[in-house]
Amino acid sequence: MTGHTVLADDVAVAFLDARPVFKGHVLVAPREHAETLADLPAATVGPFFLRVQRVSAVMPAALGCQGTFVAANNVVSQSVPHLHVHVVPRTKGDGLRGFFWPRQRYESAEEAAGYAERLREALSVSAVP
C-alpha cells in the first residue's frame, strides 16, 4: 500500500499508519530529523505538537470516533529511528486494552484513501491552528 498523507507542511507530515490499530490511525512525524522526542529542538516542539493537536482534534468528526489516543515511543518499540506520534481514533468499547495494540489492515488502497480524504477534508476546515 502506498502512503496516504493527511497533512503536510514545512513542520510535519502526517499519514495513515500502514498497519493501524484502528482504521484512521495516523502517524505525525517532524520534517526535521530527530530520533526521539528528546532530540527534537525545543523551538520545534510547540509547532510540531500543534500539528499533532490538529489531527487529534478533527478525528472525532472526520471518522465518527469518540476521542483519540496519542502516543510516542522513544527507542523501545520504536520501529523507525525517526520521531513519530501515533494518533489513534478511539471509541468506548473498541477493545484496546493497555498497551497491547492489535493491528488491522485496510481492505484495499481505496479504503485507506477514503480515510485519508476524510481526515484531509476535516483538517482543511479545522479552526485549530
Image (cartoon, rainbow, N blue to C red):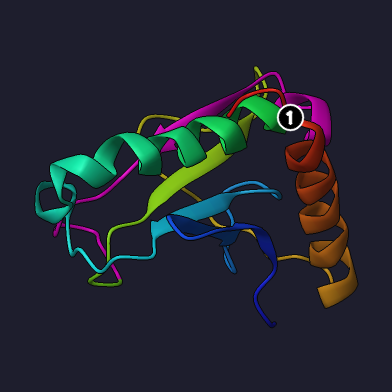
Q: Which residue is mark 1?
A: 126
Residue 68: in magenta span: yes
Between 126 and 72, the residue placed more toward the observer is 126
Q: Is residue 53 left or right of residue 79?
A: right
- Where is residue 122, by image quadrant? top right
In the displayed structure, 38 sits above or below 89; it is below
User: Residue 115: x, y in percent?
Assistant: 81, 53
Between 34 and 70, the residue placed more toward the observer is 34
Highlighted range, magenta: 60-79
Quarter containing the N terminus: bottom right
User: Residue 17: x, y in percent?
Assistant: 57, 62
Q: Is residue 94 left or right of residue 68?
A: right
In the displayed structure, 98 sits above or below 21; it is above
Quarter containing the C terminus: top right
User: Residue 14: x, y in percent?
Assistant: 55, 56
User: Residue 13: x, y in percent?
Assistant: 51, 61
Q: Is residue 100 left or right of residue 73?
A: right
Q: Is residue 116 left or right of residue 38?
A: right
In the displayed structure, 58 sits above or below 44; it is above
Q: Secondary structure at mark 1?
A: loop
Between 66 and 44, the residue placed more toward the observer is 44
Between 100 and 68, the residue placed more toward the observer is 68
Q: How many marks?
A: 1
Query: Residue placed at 38% from the left, 65% from the top?
Result: 31
Query: Residue placed at 21% from the left, 42% from the top?
Result: 43
- Where is residue 9, by image quadrant? bottom right
